[in-house]
Image (cartoon, rainbow, N blue to C red):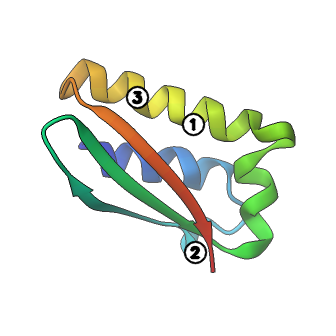
Amino acid sequence: MDIVEYTLFLVKSIAKEPDMVSVKEIGSDDDFINLEVLVKDSDMGAVIGKSGHTATALRTMVQAYSYLHEKKKVKLNIESF
């Protein structure tokens, strides 16, 4: 499982409409992996959470996964459509 699949698994577990979730790697360099998470507008509240706590937890888990497997930092961008 790569980092995109792992992030997709985590976000789909939270979203009310998991079929509408998309995760793409939008670029990486020597130090960072940039991931874009797209969720339906109605799922933004669940994915971000109260005061951003869920989004912070997602970033922490994805960063820990990356550290264990690739040793790169991850920038996670959450957007809605």
Q: Secondary structure at mark 2?
A: helix
Q: Amino acid at mark 2?
A: Met
As drawn, the residue found furthest toward the bottom would be: 81
Give the image quarter of residue 35. bottom left
> Crowding near pointer 3: few (<14 within 10 Å), some, many (20+)?
many
Callout in the foreground (3, 2): 3
Lower sequence index among marks 3 and 2: 2
Lower sequence index among marks 1 and 2: 2
x, y percent for residue 38: 54, 68
- Quadrant of the rendering where the N terminus is positioned: top left
Give the image quarter of residue 68. top left
> Crowding near pointer 1: few (<14 within 10 Å), some, many (20+)?
some
Callout in the foreground (1, 2): 1
In this figure, which residue is indicated by the disc labeled 3?
A: 63
Closest to the observer: 51 or 13? 51
x, y percent for residue 73: 32, 31
Q: Amino acid at mark 1?
A: Leu
Asked if residue 46 lies left or right of residue 63, the reply is: right
Closest to the observer: 61 or 13? 61
x, y percent for residue 7: 43, 46
**Could you tell me which residue is drawn at 68 percent across and 58 percent down?**
15
Q: In the rendered image of this protein, does residue 13 appear above or below residue 66?
A: below
Name the disc covering residue 58, or none: 1
Q: Amino acid at mark 3?
A: Gln
**Could you tell me which residue is drawn at 33 percent across and 51 percent down?**
34
x, y percent for residue 49: 80, 44
Q: Give the Cα distance between marks 1 and 2.
A: 18 Å
Q: In the rendered image of this protein, does residue 8 appear above or below residue 58?
A: below
Name the disc covering residue 20, or none: 2
**Could you tell me which residue is drawn at 59 percent across and 66 percent down?**
79
